[in-house]
Amino acid sequence: MAIQHSAVLPPTQGPGGCASDFCDFVEDVFGYLPRADQRRWADAYLRGLLTVPGKKTIRQMAKAVSLSTGAPQALQQFISASPWDWDAAREALARKAAAHLPSHTWTIGTVLAKKRGEHSVGVHRRFVADAGRTLNCQVGLGLFLTSGSTSIPVDWRLVMDEAWSGDPRRRRRARVPDEVRAQPLWAQVLDLTDRLAALKVSGPAPLVLDRRCAADAERLAAHLNLRERDFLIEIRPEQPILPARQTRPAPGPRPAGGPLSALRFMRDGGSRHPYVVTVERGGHARHLNVFSGLVRLPGSRPGAPSAQRVYRLLAERSPAHRQPTRFWLTTLVDRRVDEVLSLTHRPALTHATVQELQDDFGLLDFEGRSFPGWHHHMTMSSAAYAYSRLPRRAHRPAAV
């Protein structure tokens, strides 16, 4: 379905009436769109996300950016029906983020949208740990480029369950491509990082994940190792590991030469003495005792490169706790411990950004049901956030 041409936008203007900043951004990110009407409505949708307070409905955004009665239908068609490729826009956002965020890492953010019914693309029933119950929802995974103070979304995946993967009728109705199938979380994370690595926009930035996004850490670490991708992954205290060198065993049963938990490794003397590290979290300086030791991961095929790879295991303990409370596994074995620990707050920054995207940039306000529409909307919300956070911006665009 083509965008109708009866609705005509007023002349494009940038923030405060100045075309240079906002319009240059729109041209950089969406200038590849082949039709002039597509570029016009990309400008309008972005302007609506940046100016409309509260929930960003199509009707409210159309009212803010156009005097035409046909604008709501045209904006809806631009998002849900117009056949434009979102990958090029995301590549442009990734290049902008990489250019302006020094010493960035890659992080993953999770978006959960509660839904009624079963027709919205990808919706399924899922136990949500934060809510403590099973919800009917859509789940999206976002790849973010994250520095010490800013996290920018640059790519997205919609999580599909087996019911959606095996239902041709629902897939056809929602226009889900044949190659999109149910995958475990670790495979979705690999897909996101593989695409950004292929674009070569980021350089050798490490992937930093907390436990919310690092399910099956052992398998994920093995695949990232095969890709020669550095990482810092939070693991469970009971994660099985193998000491890289012999340690003096503590009293208690343990299989000779077999794996032991990360917690047991540290209690067995995997680290001779703690580092005292001061980290900034939640706007407050915290003092941590950090234990460090060299380990390998069990379960790899004998002779495989991942079986010989040595990782550093870090365990945090705050003064209020007698035992370590968080464990991290990393390939950054040659970095100073305080440098590595300074990266561990970045997933929390990304989760805070996801909340900001939901509250202020309409991330959950997609009104359609199709797979392309969901990706179009997530791309536009990401662009609005990037415009507001990256350098070379003046003011938000004024409502028309």
Image (tube, rainbow, N blue to C red):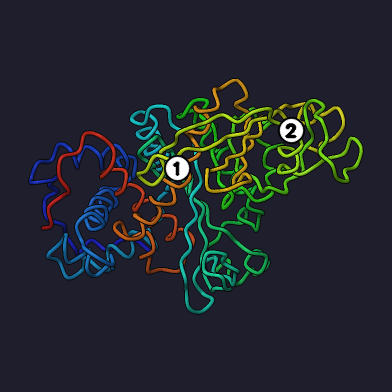
Which residue reaches farthest bottom? 117
Sequence-first tag of 1 and 2:
1
Q: Residue furthest left?
A: 17
Name above or below for residue 38 compared with residue 298.
below
* Label 2 packing within 10 angstroms: few (<14), some (14-19), many (20+): some
> Residue placed at 17% from the left, 70% from the top?
69
Q: Nearer the viewer, residue 198 or 340?
A: 340
Q: Name the residue under label 1.
A: 144
Which image quadrant: the C terminus? bottom left
Q: In this view, does 347 lie to the left or right of 127?
A: left
In which quarter of the view is residue 87 placed?
Answer: top left
The reply, left or right, for residue 367 in relation to residue 210 is: left
Residue 345 location (% of width, % of height):
46, 41
Is residue 189 found left or right of 22 in the rendered image?
Answer: right
Which residue lies at the image location 25% right of the left edge and 39% below the top edge? 25
Q: Is mark 1 on a helix, strand or loop?
A: strand
**1 vs 2, front mark:** 2
Q: Around disc 1, counting alpha carbons within 10 Å, would you say few (fewer than 14), some (14 to 19), or many (20 or more)?
A: many
- Whether tag 1 and tag 2 are in contact, CB under 8 A, the answer is no
User: How many marks are shown on the rendered structure?
Assistant: 2
Looking at the picture, tell me which residue is in the foreground, 108 or 347. 347
Q: Name the residue under label 2.
A: 269
Residue found at the far top of this picture:
334
In the foreground, 391 or 70: 391
Residue displayed at 35% across by 40% down: 150
Q: In this view, does 135 lie above or below 103?
A: below
